[in-house]
Image (spheres, helix red, strand yellow):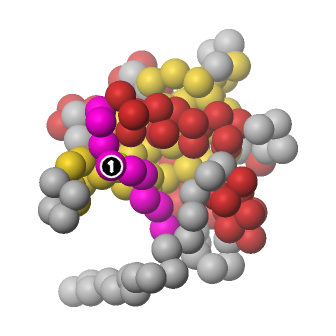
Amino acid sequence: MIRAATINDLPQLSQLFDQYRVFYRKESDLAGAELFLSERFKEEDSHIYVSDDGGELQGFVQLYPIFSSTRMRRLWLLNDLYVSPAHRGKGLSLLLLDAGKDLCRQTNACGVMLETEKSNTIGNQLYPRAGFQQNEASNFFEWTP
């Protein structure tokens, strides 16, 4: 079952979030993951959906609101998607992506955007299957201090 996450999910969600970060070659930091996610709940600045199998969280997706000035509408940034290795291959990623698309429709947003590494073979096959199209007309730039 896919549902909106609540603060009660924080212990399990933090573990999944930590695993997600480790997947992207970050050092494990369970306490930091819990703090980061608790702030998201407190500030209400993201939407998190979880795959819940009777109390066991199997995966999650997290979306942040941004805005498109040219379209003058909200746009959702799908920043995080993760399914634990034991539960992959069951279509949970597609269901979590559908929750993000539903949020987009419910909020009358102009779309959902995401970024993934070129080396993420699974994601790069998954997103087109879920109806996402690669934007080849734009360049992506990043600045970090």
Relative to the observer, which residue lies in front, 65 or 145? 65
- Label 1 is placed on what type of residue? Cys
Asked whether residue 132 appears in the rendered view, the answer is yes
Q: Is residue 110 magenta?
A: yes
Secondary structure mostly taken by the magenta-highlighted segment of the chain: loop
Where in the figure is residue 106, as x and y percent of width and height?
35, 28
Instruction: Identify the magenta region.
Output: 107-115
Residue 41 position (above or below residue 143)? above
Relative to the observer, which residue lies in front, 88 or 123? 123
On screen, residue 132 versus residue 34, left or right, reads: right
Residue 101 position (above or below residue 138)? above
Q: Quadrant of the N terminus?
A: top right
Residue 52 position (above or below residue 111)? above
On screen, residue 63 versus residue 39, left or right, reads: right
Where in the figure is residue 111, as x and y percent of width and height?
39, 50
Q: Is residue 123 magenta?
A: no
Where in the figure is residue 90, as x and y percent of width and height?
82, 36
On screen, residue 105 versus residue 70, left or right, reads: right
On screen, residue 118 versus residue 108, left or right, reads: right
Give the structural element (helix, strand or loop) at label 1.
loop
The quadrant in which residue 120 appears is bottom right
